[in-house]
Amino acid sequence: MTVTLADIQAAADRIRGHVERTPCRLSRRLSEATGAEVWVKFENLHYTSSFKERGARNALEQLSPEERARGVVTASAGNHASALARHASLLGAPCTIVMPVGTPSVKVEKSEGLGATVVIHGSGYEESVARAREIEAAEGRVFVHGFDNAAIVAGAGTCAVEMLQNAPDLDDLVVPIGGAGLIAGCAVAAKALKPGIRVVGVEAAMYPSFLARREGRTVECGGPTLAEGIAIKKIGDIPFEVADPLIDDILIVDEPDFEEAVAMFATVEKTVAEGAGAGGLAALLRHPERFAGRKVGVILCGGNIDTRLLASVLNRELVRERRLVTFRIVHDDRPGMLAAMTAAIAQAGGNIVDVVHNRLALQIPAKSTEYLIQIETRGAEHDEAIASALRSKGYALETS
């Protein structure tokens, strides 16, 4: 099975007017932060906030009227589910989505709200696929795989076509790898339109499945990752065969890098990225020497992140930057002690966010109290200044 530039151009014709042409813009501030000239393709601006609409629409457009009437089925708990549900509904095709047990209710409700019938089955993705295949056989549905499907790959490739129309001088195209449908389609388009371009894949450290397959190694993939959209244990056969000869390099990214990239998209670009969606920027932050002085295209491939998780990521980044610090002080339990500490912090310009006044900590003397004071600062230097002000008043403290 192969996918060609002609297939991708045909896909572009099919989806035109049905799938958003998302902006691709130069980010001056991300360029300053990374040392590269960074162009961002905002695939988080699709209706379902993910590039998956491209492949879903392309696959559905190629069904016959009789196949559409029978409907489609897939297994997914993520962006493919939303994309297929939406475009099947728009085309009047019944859509069933099998999701594993434990899928967050918000994802179930989203797919149902987009017109799909959701079946909960299996402890993981493979068991959900098996159930979807049973539905395919029993009901005559068309199974639409989320990435191991030539039409899905071709649809995804339209993203790179648009990028090179907006930024034809790109030196590098950096693409997150999950099931590899996106990088396969984009690599075909990019290499055909600009043979000298470098295609770089990005994988999460806990899920290096493409790199392992390329090197003929067996690795244990698993664990909780912020980049859940690319937490795939087994690469699709079709996208691997298409992409492997075309990918110039694969970079591995750790969890703090994904967090920094998500936070930077929010604070610098004022846009929301899910962990996987921020993978390209994470690679630039992790490996700046690979891209210094080059024109780099980054695909922000999705923006579906739980708001509570986003809030946590942003606060964790404040902690890393030491703009949010916690001082632990053990001192005498006497009237006025807390007031004296907070006065010293205020005089140094710190903003107190939270205070825990704990008399019952067993690891401290009975006549002492443990104070945990969370403070907002202007950064590392300000943090040190506040700590010095407290120490000068005779308070011994630990910082976290």
Image (cartoon, rainbow, N blue to C red):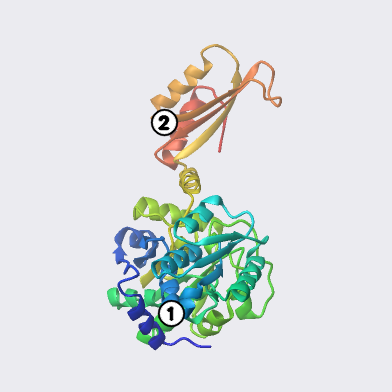
Tell which of 77 and 268 is nearer to you: 77
Label 1 sits on what residue type? Pro
Q: Give the SS element for disc 1.
A: helix
Tell which of 158 and 120 is nearer to you: 120
Q: Which mark is residue 65?
A: 1
Tell which of 357 and 1 is nearer to you: 1
Is residue 247 in view?
A: yes
The residue where tag 2 is placed is: 350
Is residue 288 in view?
A: no
Tell which of 85 and 157 is nearer to you: 85
> Do tag 1 and tag 2 residues touch (Cβ < 8 Å)?
no
Looking at the rendering, in which quadrant would you find the C terminus? top right
* Residue 394, quarter of picture: top right
Residue 130 drawn above or below residue 276: below
Residue 57 x/y as whole percent: 41, 73
Residue 112 x/y as whole percent: 49, 57
Q: Nearer the viewer, mark 1 or mark 2?
A: 1
What is the distance, in whole Å, between disc 1 and disc 2 at their CAs? 66 Å
Q: How many marks?
A: 2
The reply, left or right, for residue 126 in relation to residue 267 is: right
Which sits earlier in the primary sequence, circle 1 or circle 2?
A: 1
Q: Give the SS element for disc 2.
A: loop
Q: Which mark is residue 148?
A: none
Q: Residue at x 59, y 21 (%)?
A: 331
Dot 1: within a 10 Å radius of its alpha carbon, few (fewer than 14), some, or many (20 or more) residues? few
Label 2 sits on what residue type? Gly
Residue 241 x/y as whole percent: 55, 84
Residue 357 x/y as whole percent: 57, 22
The outermost residue toward the right is 362
* Residue 74, quarter of picture: bottom right
